[in-house]
Image (cartoon, helix red, strand yellow):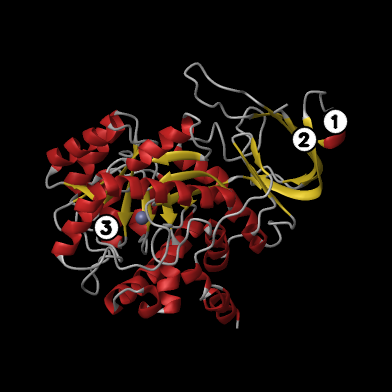
Amino acid sequence: MKNLAITNIRLFNGKMDSVILPKATILIEWCGKGKNGEILDGKISQIGQMDKIPIPKDYKIVDLNGKFVIPGLINVHCHFTANGEPMTAMQGSERKMKILQWFLRSKLGKRYVKKQMRTNIQAALNSGVTTIRNAGDPEYYDIEVKKEIDAGKIAGPRIVCAGRSICVTGGHGGVISHIIDGPWEGRKAVRDCLRHESDVIKILSTGGVTDSKKIGEAGRPQMTTEEIAAICDEAHRAGVKVMTHCESTVGIREALLGGVDSIEHGAPITDDLINLFKNNPKSLNGYTTLVSTISAAQDIVALGAEVLKVTDIIQQNGKIILEGMIEGLHTAVKHDIPMAMGTDAAVPFVPHYEFWRELVYYQHFAGISNKRAINIATEQNAKLLGVDEVTGTLEVGKSADFVVYDGNPLEDLMVLEKPVHVVYRGNLIKNPSYKKIKEIEKYDSKRFFSILKKEKQ
Ligand SMILES: [Zn+2]
């Protein structure tokens, strides 16, 4: 009996105009396998007030005794290859980068990377993340892992993959990306991604923090508007969105004019750009979404270069980017620019199991309500990924993706750290667990909590 009746719960369906339903039931219909043997998502067949939903005989009853349920969380920006452990892999000489690249492409490298990916995906899932977008990784290994999951070979969440990202010669992310110079090379790289079934195109249009060698390099415009526009046109012709790593105001302007669908990380947003976000005729859906990733820069600033095993230059660039990102997020909140949320899990001190922190940061730094933070992390994130008809809110006909907590996340977002159960694609994880990374845990008291305390004083 695989049909499930999750009952006696306090339910928040994820929508901004709804409140907690105090005594609710969710019926999950097991849908089995599809024509090609692929696993079909278990669907919500009924949802609502407990006393109005009789439980059919062939449903297994799970009485949750008043626990809280919200939609499964969606992390729209991570990289499966790395787990957030402090490491120096992306820093160093050209020769070191060449060796790293050679390893990543080797048989052994492929096996190693795919193993890491499976572990990191499981950690995310067990922390309550039921849908993940991978924002660029070596080769197209992420797509291979996604296919293993969808075919039912291994259990896993819903995944949206970029495959190999795209950057310019000498640009940020060069080790794992297609290198392009000129619009036609950009189009060719997009075509290669589409051939490998990338769900989204990831470009890096400005410099970044993690491989910067000069102050101010993060955010320096690298890809030209002409190149970005060609890439967007090619992707949009196939109905595929483009996300760009972008960390400066100049970079945001060029990317918006090029037609990108999301700005990842962010920077201060000037008045002339507000309307271009909200009404961007060159983007796929007519607007561009801002995806801040506060987690990615927060700990570099809080813990310092030595702990994170990065250079002082990287730390200083991290500080500049963090301040700009928060300023941009404030503008987005004030002017109702479409927003989504990711962590950039993989960069030092951002493990895949801590997406919940990003909601706390959004609430804290951008001054939004807990409800809005949850709504962005679920319904809005689903919209950006184009999976909002399947997940993001809890409604009849959607995939059963939700998380169960002891406390009320609408009152306290810290509750999100410890899910009691996770339900993904109709499957119940009774005792979710994952291995925490020791190197990160060592500094836990100095991270985050001390910062929030300082801010409050
Ligand atoms: Zn990233």
Asked if the beta carbon under badge 2 is closer than 8 A to the nearest atom of ligand 1, the reply is: no
Q: Disc 1 marks which residue? A: 52
Q: CA distance from mark 1 to mark 2?
A: 7 Å
Sequence-first disc among 3 and 2: 2
Instruction: Name which residue type carries label 3.
Output: Gly
Q: Which mark's residue is nearer the viewer, 3 or 2?
A: 2
Q: Disc 3 marks which residue? A: 251
Contact between marks 1 and 2 (CB within 8 A): the answer is yes
Rendered residue at 61%/31% (across/down)? 398
Quadrant location, the N terminus: top right
Instruction: Name which residue type carries label 2.
Output: Gly
Q: Is residue 457 visible?
A: yes
> In the depicted view, which residue is nearer to us: 367 or 356?
356
Rendered residue at 53%/56% (across/down)? 353
Residue 270 quadrant: bottom left
Tag 1 secondary structure: helix
